[in-house]
């Protein structure tokens, strides 16, 4: 029996980057995959096809994770299509980096809404399903900068730190119902998000990593698989860093 056989996982922001790697890793472990992105575009279509070719049920949904209304509709649609939701990975996230003196109110509000409010939206919406099922695993994609802070990323760091407080609170609130909630704090992972950084910044980041290499989406997906599966049935309220030792 595969690790996630007969389970359904919802992953937000999965058509590229870390979310995509998680979807593929979960499918390899036997899970049926529902995933959401802002738009149902070529990336989403390609992933949907790739997942189906792996022999699992898969469906992409266009849904804005930062919208409270969208979250409720998304969960209802997935329940109609799949009948259950065992795992939620709150992965959708954005950056709008700037020094505080230049940061606009819009840059602050957007990052908090997409990165942090989305976690409230989706967790609240999926909670009723998981409470009925009396089981569930929620995995929130935080960041090392949510633990340590980072100059030029006060909005992003605040959103990721907020996710950690939320994760620990939810673990305490619904642990008695066999619903676990953990966070992953990735370090420097090679995706389109980090491709925006210039070479000097990349070099400084990589020199500060004990393992002396960037992380890959698959490195994060392996830990997400652990947290989603029964390998971690006694793990909740934790933040697991996947950062090549950066936070050590
Ligand atoms: P990415 O390559 O930029 O992908 C982000 C994904 O989120 C895309 O699929 C995007 O969908 C989706 N998304 C953005 N806004 C959304 C919204 N409002 N509703 C639904 N989906 C939305 O990012 P990544 O590097 O894979 O990062 C994934 C997560 O890991 C993020 O939460 C990020 O903060 C976190 N993280 C990344 C790193 C890193 O080094 N890469 C480090 C620490 C933490 P569209 O294609 O539709 O825009």
Image (cartoon, grey):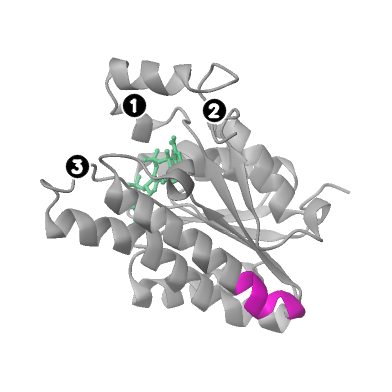
Q: Which residue is mark 2?
A: 216
Give the residue drawn at x 14%, y 60%: 105
Which comes sooner in the sequence, label 2 or label 1?
1
In the image, farthest residue toward the right: 1
Q: Of residues 207 and 173, which is closer to you in this image? A: 207
Q: Report the Cα–Cα distance between label 1 and label 3.
A: 17 Å
Q: Of residues 134 and 35, which is closer to you in this image? A: 134
Give the residue drawn at x 44%, y 56%: 161
Label 3 residue SS? loop
Residue 182 percent across, percent down from the top left: 63, 58
Give the residue drawn at x 47%, y 61%: 163
Q: Which residue is mark 1?
A: 195
Q: Of residues 77 and 70, which is closer to you in this image? A: 70
In this picture, is 88 found above or below 240? Answer: below
Q: In the image, which residues are magenta?
A: 170-176
**Disc number for residue 13:** none
Q: Which residue is mark 3?
A: 98
Which callout, 1 or 3, points to the residue nearer the camera? 3
């Amino acid at each position: 029996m595969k690790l996630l056989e007969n389970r359904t996982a919802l992953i937000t922001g999965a058509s590229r980057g870390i979310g995509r790697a998680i979807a593929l890793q979960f499918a390899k472990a036997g899970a049926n995959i529902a995933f959401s992105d802002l738009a149902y575009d070529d990336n989403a279509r390609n992933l949907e096809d790739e997942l189906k070719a792996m022999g699992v049920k898969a469906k992409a949904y266009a849904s804005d994770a930062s919208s409270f209304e969208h979250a409720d509709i998304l969960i209802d649609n997935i329940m109609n299509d799949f009948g259950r939701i065992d795992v939620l990975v709150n992965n959708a996230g954005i950056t709008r980096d700037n020094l505080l003196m230049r940061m606009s109110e819009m840059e602050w509000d957007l990052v908090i809404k997409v990165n942090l409010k989305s976690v409230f939206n989706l967790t609240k919406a999926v909670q009723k399903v998981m409470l009925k099922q009396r089981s569930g695993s929620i995995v929130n994609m935080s960041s090392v900068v949510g633990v340590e802070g980072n100059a030029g990323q006060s909005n992003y760091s605040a959103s990721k730190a907020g996710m950690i407080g939320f994760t620990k609170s939810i673990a305490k609130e619904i642990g008695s119902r066999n619903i676990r909630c953990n966070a992953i704090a990735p370090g420097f992972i090679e995706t389109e998000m980090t491709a925006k950084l210039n070479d000097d910044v990349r070099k400084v980041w990589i020199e500060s990593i004990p393992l002396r290499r960037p992380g890959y989406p698959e490195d994060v997906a392996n830990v997400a698989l652990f947290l989603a599966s029964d390998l971690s049935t006694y793990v909740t309220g934790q933040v697991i860093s996947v950062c090549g030792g950066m936070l050590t």
